[in-house]
Image (tube, rainbow, N blue to C red):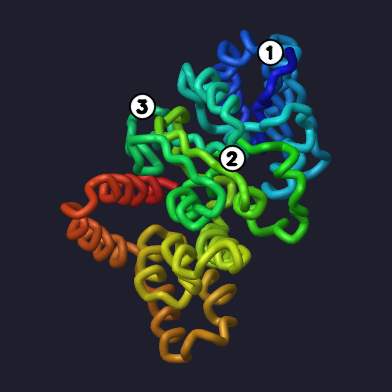
Amino acid sequence: MAPPLSICIPTYNRAGFLRECLEAFLPQVTPHRIPINVSDNGSTDGTRDVLEEFRRRYPLLTYRSQPANLGIDRNMVEVVSMTETPYAWLFGDDDVPEPDAVARVLRYLDKGYKLIVVNAATYNQDLTERVEDRRVNLSADRIYPPGDHDRLMIDTASYITYLGGLVVVVKSWRSVDPKPFYGTDYVHVSLVLRYIVGHTAALCAAPLIKLRLQRQTWFSRYFEVEMVNWPRTVWGLPSEHYSNAAKQAVCDERPTASLRRIISTRAYGQYDRRAYDSHVAPDVTIAGWRKQVFKIIAALPQPWFRIAFVAYIRAQQMRDPSRYALAMFRLRETSKW
């Protein structure tokens, strides 16, 4: 019997983490003969050697080496194009599945959902410290019938920016043209939130993934990715299917005009004069006086804003302890990066 699922891993220069990921998958996929597809985005480390080793160990592993870095969006589309199974589980190359993850995901496939969002727990870089029990803070599975797209987006959109939580129907994924979303860093979000319209999705609330919180390959572009590309992705979703109220619940339409967001990104070290010159100064919708304030923030010492932001999130601790713990962890880690 042909397997219903493939594991699809886009990778780039993460040979050590990729090895750990594949080691965790091998005992789970072998009994079910589940293919593993890897698209290597022009890595310059030992990624190809790792892939050759695992292909010898598991003949159902297929990889494709891109001649150059295509960007994360194209690489995600590439890896799904390699699969011949009805479902594909997009998985991050630096993360690790829990020991029963594959078996539990397979049970969801029998129910015919067009999208399965698989929850994760957040860990530090070496997976020794659990920072967050659930990225999506729901303790029970949730089903999203046709017409419940707003609730699906509100519950999961910020989480599925992380591609490892997505089990997609391959035919449906391919039904949406990805080209308009290349260069956004969020092609996967754009595709699934379009194709799921009129269909049923499910959230697996149990955290089946160990999500490694670390410096990403796009960290130097964080301001552009998070403050420009992400709101464009959310607010660019079709208004006939997603309400403005739901979009606002996910993110501000113009976070680059928000004093609070500018201060927080400065505290994290993700906003500086380069970000100001590239994304704030050219924005004609931001008032001149506000731009001057943002310019000053970019020039002032970052530690001042870290101190102020720590005080702010400590004031929020009683209201949401889990978000406080994550914010403090991120502040601590970004100071190392």
**Quarter occupied by residue 228:** bottom right
| Residue 90 seen anywhere in this rendered image of the structure | yes
In front: label 2 or label 1: 2
Task: Residue under label 3, please give it.
Answer: 128
Left or right: where does residue 149 sit relative to residue 182?
left
Q: What residue type is labelled 2?
A: Leu
Disc 1 on helix, strand or loop? loop
Of 91 and 269, nearer the camera is 91
In front: label 1 or label 3: 1
Mark found first going from the N terminus, 1 or 3: 1
Image disc number at residue 115 = 2
Q: Which residue does the image show at 67% across and 50% down from the upper left? A: 195
Mark found first going from the N terminus, 2 or 3: 2
Q: Are marks 2 and 1 in contact (CB under 8 Å)?
A: no
What's the CA distance linking mark 2 and mark 3? Answer: 31 Å
Q: Which residue does the image show at 62% across and 39% down from the upper left? A: 114
Disc 2 on helix, strand or loop? strand
